[in-house]
Amino acid sequence: MSIELLSDILISNWYIVLLFFAVAILYSSVGFGGGSSYLAILALTGIAYTQIRSTALLCNIIVVSGNVFFFQQNKLYNWKKVIPLVLFSVPLAFLGGYLKINQTFFFILLGFTLLFAAITMWISKRIVSNTNDIKNLSISKNAGYGGIIGFISGMVGIGGGIFLAPILHLTRWDVPKKIAATASLFILVNSMSGLIGQYFNPDFAIDWNLTSILLITVFIGGQIGSRLSNRFFSPIQLKKATSILIAFASLKILWDYIQ
């Protein structure tokens, strides 16, 4: 990429780069990727819908990879509980990404998905802090949650952590740190699987010039955020702020495509 082309892309898309940088810092500081916010931002920019999913998933992968490594180093994974969640989510995320969907259906699905995510983020407050409060879900329930979320995530272009984490909190699946670790892993494997599925989709497309800049941006932002590690932003503050952004984007998308 030439200096002139890089300059042109940055000038014409400076607000997207700045927003992605901020989202990466905020989300990685509490162990998430930011896929829903990336989707919300891209959906409001006029970028081709065939590129939105792949760009958001690539950014997800970049941001959460470091978090997964950090959580593994700190032994925060209970693999007996984690494996059923991801075992069915991965193939279904691939299937969701592979499905060929038209523009109208994609944006309507995206609008309702983001609206649901925004509402869930706003009202979800229940946190398990005592290990005595933990409940062990059956393997079938873990697999069911993972599979359904994985399929929807693959179609829309998110990692699914924004759906999984509230469910795990509400069902008292584990303590917050282990839920954050599990959500990060879930986001990583489903983003990779959904992206592979999209690659085999005939409609797969991606603007590598803009995407490469966004990947570098979220990598830097993710590294900064992971080092903040809740020093300035609490999960509740993050959820409240981003739920407003996501709700606004979802309502605008639905207004444009349901008429």
Image (tube, rainbow, N blue to C red):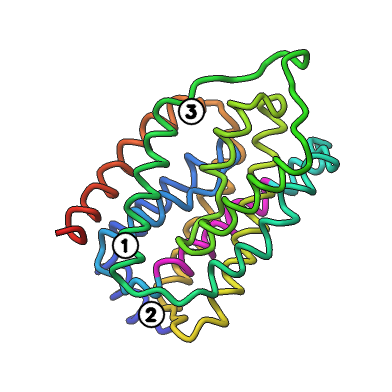
Task: Name the amino acid, label 1.
Answer: Phe
Please tell me in which quadrant of the rendered image residue 10 appears.
bottom left
| In contact (CB < 8 Å): disc 1 and disc 2 | no
Q: For the residue marked with disc 2, what is the amino acid?
A: Ile
Position of the C terminus by quadrant? bottom left
For label 2, the SS is helix
Mark 1 lies on residue: 107
Mark 2 or 3: in front is 3
Q: Residues within 10 Å of mark 2 (few under 14, many from 20)?
A: few
Compared across the picture, whether 60 is left or right of 145 comes to: left
10 Å crowding of disc 1: few (<14), some (14-19), many (20+): many
Which is nearer the N-term, disc 3 or disc 1? 1
Viewer-side label of 3, 1: 1
Mark 3 crowd level (few <14, some 14–19, many ≥20, 10 Å Cα): some
Residue receiving disc 2: 3
Q: Percent x, y for residue 38?
A: 41, 55
**Residues in magenta?**
52-67
Q: Let me know if residue 115 is in the magenta part.
A: no
Q: Amino acid at mark 3?
A: Phe
Tell whether label 3 touches label 2 (CB within 8 Å): no
Question: Where residue 176 appears, x then y in whole percent?
Answer: 66, 26
Is 257 situated left or right of 82 in this image?
Answer: left
Residue under pointer 3: 233
Label 1: element kind: helix
Q: Is residue 154 above or below residue 234?
A: below
User: Is residue 62 in the magenta section?
Assistant: yes
